[in-house]
């Protein structure tokens, strides 16, 4: 929202304007009487000398309006805009700034537990009870926010995520130092995702593992050595760690080792950067993947030293890592290209707005979006409607697909891929059979006869037809078992066909009964157990588990088990799109 309210994505000059006024609690104190004027609004400092300092904010939220945009929201409520503003102020000024007064008190107070005193040893300035404003602060904030909001949208989103992670990391030091350390690393890592992953080099690989592999390959030909090393690197995250290091090093300006390091204790040195960053990334990985805590010596504050030798390894302290992360994020914002205007669907980025798929009745019967590549989705959605009718769900019915079927008849099916053709013909056949519209479709049988080779091999499309109209499967048990296994592997793939829970259960129980009838009781019992765990919400299937105690299984009628009060989709007829 911080970038959207600048209007750089708006096409008209007309906007709904909503003033949000409230209070930021902070340890930052300014004694000027005039408000702080910033690109996002203005801030009126409190005049009290004791207790928490406050900044009364006045932030104007802008949402584009216009005749063609009727029905749009006037305001998002401002929560994200206000939160991002607080995060940016916290980041730029290196302070605590939040709408939560209790948080400021917990992080800066030196009360009975002396938590504030302890936290101040991790990071300079941030947790001080009073951080006095400096003469150039207002200009610094103005410059940073202007640069941040001028970024291209993708760069802005990357930067604001990194800033949020950084600020969250400072807050988490109080209760989870391992998480806080990892979040500081992640704030840099988030920015590094914007660049291509470099090709990993063998010298980047962990020294101990590298030595063991090199020893094993000692007598192997050089060509084989290179192939093995390449295969090892391809299976590791070496390149990702290298991208993190390279990005951080490339975004350090000369000032990082000069003016900014002037008053630092044991400051970060350039020759040590590769080792320091590798160590920091390893600590982050240990926490993320194995919940490993940071070393105890890191939890013992170093009175602002930026580096420390821990078990023979040079390591970034919280102070060193935080200063490095702040510098890298700031440099990223400064270096990335700026644009005054940009085409971007800003409404998709509004908070409190979600995109959800339309109910099938609003689009399934419209032929304009129907094409071979979407045929699978159309069939899958129609199967959902069929299942609803069979269950007798409220307002269930079949969408009128006659216009879609007209389009299928007009398509050059001979030139369409077989997989798409099967989905199209299955949809065509199911609609005609279920709605009794065969008399309206004289080409029905002709199409099925002409393209019957599309169904020569077992397919999920024909399986769906057999399940819906309760037709016997035209395949052997081994073919059914292969189809059963392949279905569960592909159902969540991008181009997979999801039959829905009812037809999946129908297939499972019918396959169970086929095996029982053929004398394969062991497999039938396996399928009952599978059905119970695959459809745990179905009480009728759970009751089948009681049959497992019997010496001989009773016949299983899938329809009776799954649809004891069966409705018929033909009864309702098609509904209009």
Image: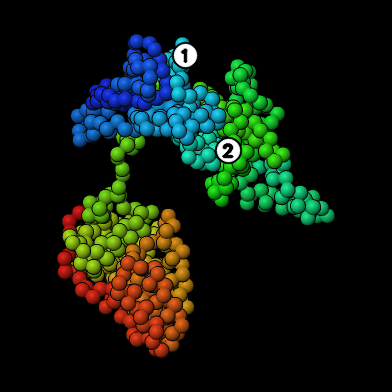
Badge 2 marks a residue whose secondary structure is: helix
Instruction: Please state which of residues 50 and 54 is positioned toward the viewer in this rendering.
Output: 50
User: Which quarter of the figure has residue 54?
Assistant: top left
> Which residue is pictured at 40% across the width and 25% down the height?
26
Residue 576, percent across and down? Answer: 17, 56
Q: Give the distance between the C-alpha atoms of the residues marked 2 and 1, in whole angstroms.
A: 31 Å
Q: In which quarter of the image is the C terminus?
A: bottom left
Give percent across and percent down for residue 394.
Answer: 18, 61
Graded by Cα atoms within 10 Å as few (under 14), some (14 to 19) or many (20 or more), the crowding at tag 1 reads: few
Q: Which of 502 and 342 is in front in this view?
A: 502
Residue 274 in percent (x, y) is at: 67, 34
Q: In this rendering, would 343 be left or right of 121?
A: left
Which mark is on residue 134? 1
Quarter of the image where one finds residue 240: top right
Instruction: Report the front residue among 71 and 138.
Output: 138
From this view, report whether residue 476 is shown above or below residue 163.
below
Residue 383 appears anywhere in the view = yes
| Residue in view at x 72 percent, y 39 percent | 312
Q: What residue does disc 2 label?
A: 299
Vertical relation: 427 (above or below) 257: below
Q: Which quadrant does the N terminus fall into?
A: top left
| The furthest residue to the right | 219
* Mark 2 Cα-neighbour bin, 10 Å: few <14, some 14–19, many ≥20: some
Label 2 or label 1, whichever lies nearer to me, is 2
**Secondary structure category for the residue under label 1:** loop
Toward the viewer: 86 or 245? 86
- Decide: is 41 above or below 364: above
Residue 448 shows in the view: no
């Amino acid at each position: 929202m911080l970038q959207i309210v600048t209007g750089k994505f708006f096409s008209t000059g007309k906007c709904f304007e909503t003033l949000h006024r409230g209070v930021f609690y902070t340890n930052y104190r300014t004694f000027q009487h005039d408000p702080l004027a910033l690109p996002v609004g203005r801030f009126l400092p409190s005049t009290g000398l004791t207790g928490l300092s406050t900044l009364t904010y006045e932030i104007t939220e802008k949402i584009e309006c216009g005749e063609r945009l009727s029905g749009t929201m006037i305001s998002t409520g401002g929560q994200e805009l206000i939160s991002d503003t607080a995060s940016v102020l916290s980041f730029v000024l290196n302070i605590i700034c939040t709408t939560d007064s209790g948080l400021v008190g917990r992080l800066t107070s030196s009360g009975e537990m002396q938590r504030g005193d302890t936290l101040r040893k991790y990071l300079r300035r941030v947790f001080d009870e009073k951080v006095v404003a400096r003469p150039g602060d207002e200009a610094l904030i103005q410059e940073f926010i202007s640069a941040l909001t001028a970024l291209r949208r993708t760069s802005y989103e990357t930067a604001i995520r990194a800033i949020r992670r950084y600020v969250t990391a400072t807050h988490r030091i109080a209760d989870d130092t391992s998480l806080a350390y990892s979040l500081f690393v992640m704030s840099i890592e988030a920015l590094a995702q914007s660049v291509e992953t470099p090709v990993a080099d063998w010298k980047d690989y962990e020294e101990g593992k590298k030595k063991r592999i090199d020893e094993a390959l000692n007598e192997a030909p050089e060509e084989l050595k290179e192939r093995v090393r390449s295969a090892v690197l391809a299976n590791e995250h070496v390149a990702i760690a290298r991208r993190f290091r390279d990005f951080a090093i490339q975004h350090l300006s000369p000032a990082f080792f000069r003016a900014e390091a002037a008053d630092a204790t044991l400051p970060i040195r350039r020759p040590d950067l590769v080792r320091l960053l590798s160590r920091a990334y390893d600590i982050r990985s240990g926490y993320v993947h194995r919940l490993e805590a940071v070393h105890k010596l890191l939890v013992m504050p170093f009175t602002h030293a930026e580096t420390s030798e821990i078990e023979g390894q040079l390591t970034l302290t919280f102070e060193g890592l935080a200063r490095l992360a702040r510098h890298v994020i700031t440099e990223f914002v400064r270096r990335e290209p700026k644009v005054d205007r940009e085409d971007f669907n800003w409404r998709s980025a509004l908070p409190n707005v979600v995109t959800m798929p339309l109910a099938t009745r609003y689009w399934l019967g419209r032929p304009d979006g129907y094409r071979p590549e979407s045929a699978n989705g159309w069939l899958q959605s129609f199967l959902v409607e069929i299942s609803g009718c069979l269950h007798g769900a409220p307002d269930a019915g079949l969408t009128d697909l006659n216009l879609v079927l007209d389009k299928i008849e007009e398509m050059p099916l001979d030139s369409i891929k077989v997989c798409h053709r099967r989905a199209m013909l299955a949809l065509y056949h199911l609609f005609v059979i279920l709605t009794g519209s065969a008399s309206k479709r004289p080409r029905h049988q002709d199409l099925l006869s002409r393209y019957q080779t599309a169904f020569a091999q077992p397919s999920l499309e024909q399986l769906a037809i057999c399940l819906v109209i309760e037709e016997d499967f035209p395949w052997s048990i081994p073919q059914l078992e292969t189809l059963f296994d392949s279905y569960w592997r592909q159902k969540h793939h991008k181009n997979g066909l999801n039959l829905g829970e009812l037809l999946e259960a129908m297939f499972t129980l019918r396959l169970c009964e086929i095996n029982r009838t053929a004398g394969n009781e062991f497999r039938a019992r396996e399928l009952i157990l599978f059905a119970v765990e695959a459809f745990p919400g179905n009480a009728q299937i759970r009751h089948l588990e009681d049959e497992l105690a019997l010496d001989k299984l009773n016949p299983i009628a899938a329809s009776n088990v799954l649809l004891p009060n069966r409705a018929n989709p033909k009864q309702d007829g098609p509904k209009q799109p």
